[in-house]
Image (tube, grey):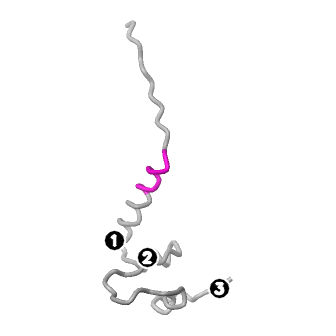
Amino acid sequence: DGEDKISYIISHCKEDKVAILEFAVKTLLANQDYQALSLNFDLYVNDPKEDKLIESIEEISKYFDKPLVLD
């Protein structure tokens, strides 16, 4: 039909990856709470409901059934 077509190439940038991770973490927290991050991904988050922040891995390990393993 004689029309010129334009192709766009979309490349992912760092901000996209950060936004995806942020969405995934927020969704996981909303659905499974903080323990899911610890047990599934070895990520540790201070619970904002607690007045005292968790200071170390040793402190965190006592809240979960998962044993503490230090390399």
Residue behind mark 1: 31
- Say which amino acid is labelled 1: Asn
Q: Which residues are magenta?
A: 13-20
Vertically, is 12 above or below 58? Answer: above
Vertically, is 57 above or below 12? Answer: below
SS at circle 3: loop
SS at circle 1: helix
Q: Which mark is residue 36?
A: 2
19 in magenta: yes
48 in magenta: no
Spot the residue most to the top.
Answer: 2
Percent across and percent down for residue 49 are 31, 84
Q: CA distance from mark 2 to mark 1?
A: 9 Å
The answer to whether the residue labelled 2 contacts the one labelled 1, judged by CB atoms less than 8 Å apart, is yes
Name the N-terminal-most of marks 2 and 1. 1
- Disc 1 crowd rating (10 Å Cα; few below 14, some 14-19, many 20+) is few
- Say which amino acid is labelled 2: Ala
Name the N-terminal-most of marks 1 and 3. 1
Q: Image quarter for residue 51?
A: bottom left
Percent across and percent down for residue 30 are 32, 70
Q: CA distance from mark 1 to mark 3?
A: 29 Å
Percent across and percent down for residue 41 are 51, 72
